[in-house]
Image: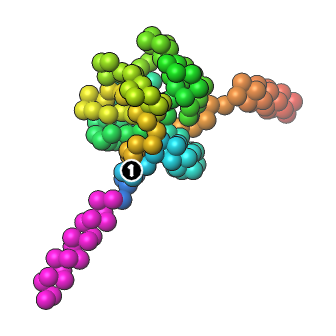
Amino acid sequence: MTNAFHVLACAAGLAVAGSVAAAPVQFADNGHYYEWVNARVSWDAAVAASAASSYLGMTGYLVTVTSDAESDFIYGSVTSSRAWAGGSDSEEEGVWKWITGPEAGTAFWSHGSTLTYARWTIGEPNDSGGGEHALVIHNLAANWNDEGGVNRNGYVIEYSAPVPEPSTYALFALGLIGIGLAARRR
């Protein structure tokens, strides 16, 4: 009976360990961190959960993908499963925008034309059956598909330090000038 108990305890431990998320992984090209969440949720739930997450003082957001290198990193180092991403054409059919992160509001695809970066699977986005307004990374080539947001997928949270406003640089420069003037007076 003791052996059966140990086997069950080990199996339960492995099951729990398998569901625990790994620490976010940093992509050297942009300094951002990425975290795979293996929870089958709707796109809206993934957006909300990502925004409620933080890592090293950075607020999370549902991943935005802006280059092949970033896409390959995410799909090779963070996950190889279907994953929600932060793009949608819910405002205007056929105009895909980033809804999350620093790129929020930026259109990346419009009626068949790539505006910044897109990695659609051939024939996508197609709004098959209507209502496909959520972006999902969906296959081993890390290509994209449009899906209904009520589908259940895992998701990737991206963390990046906020970009300072230009006024922050101006204040910093004024501070340096002040320090320099004070040092000259001594």
Q: Is residue 70 above or below residue 83?
A: above
Q: SS class of the residue under badge 1?
A: strand
Please identify the quarter of the rendering in which residue 21 is found: bottom left
| Residue 109, percent from left and from top | 48, 17
Where is residue 7? Give x, y as percent.
16, 76
In the rendered image, the vertical position of residue 137 relative to residue 20, given as above or below: above
- Taking the spot 87% from the left edge, 30% from the top edge, the residue there is 185
Q: Is residue 135 above or below residue 78?
A: above
Magenta residues, dominant SS class:
helix
Relative image position of residue 146 (x, y in whole percent): 40, 29
| Direction bottom: furthest residue | 1
Identify the amino acid type marked 1: Arg
Q: Is residue 42 magenta?
A: no
The magenta region covers 1-19
Label 1 CA crowd tier, 10 Å (few <14, some 14–19, many 20+): some
List the residue tagged with mark 1: 40
